[in-house]
Structure formats: structure tokens, C-alpha cells
Image (spheres, rainbow, N blue to C red):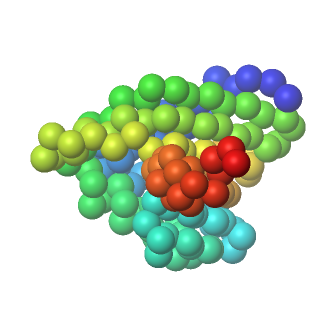
């Protein structure tokens, strides 16, 4: 396993594309494989194959020009033809609010280009908020 500048650049490119509303990133860096998986922050965002591919186009097109993104953390790694990365984007919303989700993705080298094959984004909540006191010491 090694750190990968290429993977970091591809990930940073996604967030830049979202800010600009550029759907071209998806066409360059998302696999068309039926095993593509996208898990988003909304409970209904559990997508496979073509619907996942379309979701990323729609997300960039719908959000473009409405948000600003600063990457607080960004890491990328690779081993052979597989790469993965994580990011903590700070997203500034039009109403002045901010969201800081956790983001991770897996990429595969396809015909010389890094293609996203799995993406997961979540908004962190404390264990207590999600599960009550089940995780508290007895």
C-alpha cells in the first residue's frame, strides 16, 4: 500500500466539479460497471449500477454554484490497480449553514484512468444520539 497523489487529485476534482456543477468529472472518473455502488447521506441513497451513475450526474448538476467546499482532510492510497481515499469536506450551504460529512471511496484503474466503483458519505452523529445509552458503561 502506498500514498497516492493521483487518488487525492481525483477526489479533490470531484468536490471541485460539484462546486462548479461540472458533470464531466463523472464521465471521466466513474465506472459504468453494474457493480458500482453509491451510499449517500439520505436513507434513500443506496444505489447500484446505472442509477448510481445517474445520481452523481444529477448531484453535480443540482448543487453546482450553490455550495462552497473546503477539504479539511484528504487522503488517497493505492495498491496495484485499486485505490481508495477518504475526505472530510466542509460544505457551506446557501443559507449560511455548514455540513461536515465523512466521505470515502474506492477506485479501480480502468484503461489507464481511475474510476470510482464505490462511494459512501455520512453525517456523523454521536453514539448516544443514535443508540441512546446502550454504549455507555454500566
User: Can residue 113 be seen by looking at this rendering?
Assistant: no
| Point 70% across, 48% down: residue | 138
Q: Is residue 41 left or right of residue 34?
A: left
Instruction: Identify the residue shown where x is 65% and y is 51%.
Output: 135
In the depicted structure, whether residue 101 falls above or below residue 69: below
In the image shown, does 97 or 92 lie closer to the viewer?
Answer: 97
129 or 133: nearer the viewer: 133
The residue located at (70%, 41%) in the rendering is 84
Q: Above or below — where is 96 with respect to 26?
A: above
Image quadrant occupied by the N terminus: top right
Tell me residue 62's x, y (percent): 27, 61
Looking at the image, which residue sits at the far front? Answer: 138
> Residue placed at 47% from the left, 75% from the top?
44
- Residue 53 visible in image: yes
Instruction: Residue 74 in the image: state x and y as whole percent.
Output: 55, 28
All told, the count of numbered labels is 0
Front residue (pair 101, 119): 101
Which residue ends up furthest to the left in the rendered image? 95
Left or right of 68: which side holds 108?
right
2 relative to 119 in the view: left or right: right
Q: Quarter-wise, where is residue 131 in the image?
A: bottom right
Locate residue 11, reporting x and y percent: 54, 38
Q: Position of residue 28 (x, y in %)?
A: 54, 50
Amino acid at each position: 500500500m502506498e500514498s497516492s497523489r493521483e487518488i487525492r487529485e481525483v477526489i479533490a476534482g470531484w468536490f471541485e466539479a460539484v462546486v462548479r456543477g461540472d458533470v464531466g468529472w463523472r464521465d471521466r472518473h466513474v465506472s459504468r460497471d453494474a457493480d458500482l455502488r453509491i451510499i449517500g447521506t439520505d436513507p434513500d441513497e443506496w444505489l447500484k449500477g446505472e442509477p448510481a451513475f445517474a445520481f452523481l450526474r444529477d448531484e453535480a448538476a443540482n448543487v453546482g454554484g450553490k455550495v462552497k467546499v473546503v477539504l479539511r482532510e484528504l487522503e488517497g492510497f493505492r495498491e496495484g490497480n485499486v485505490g481508495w481515499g477518504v475526505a472530510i469536506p466542509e460544505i457551506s450551504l446557501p443559507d449560511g449553514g455548514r455540513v461536515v460529512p465523512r466521505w470515502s471511496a474506492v477506485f479501480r484503474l480502468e484503461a489507464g484512468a481511475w474510476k470510482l466503483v464505490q462511494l459512501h458519505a455520512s453525517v456523523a452523529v454521536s453514539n448516544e444520539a443514535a443508540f441512546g445509552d446502550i454504549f455507555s458503561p454500566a
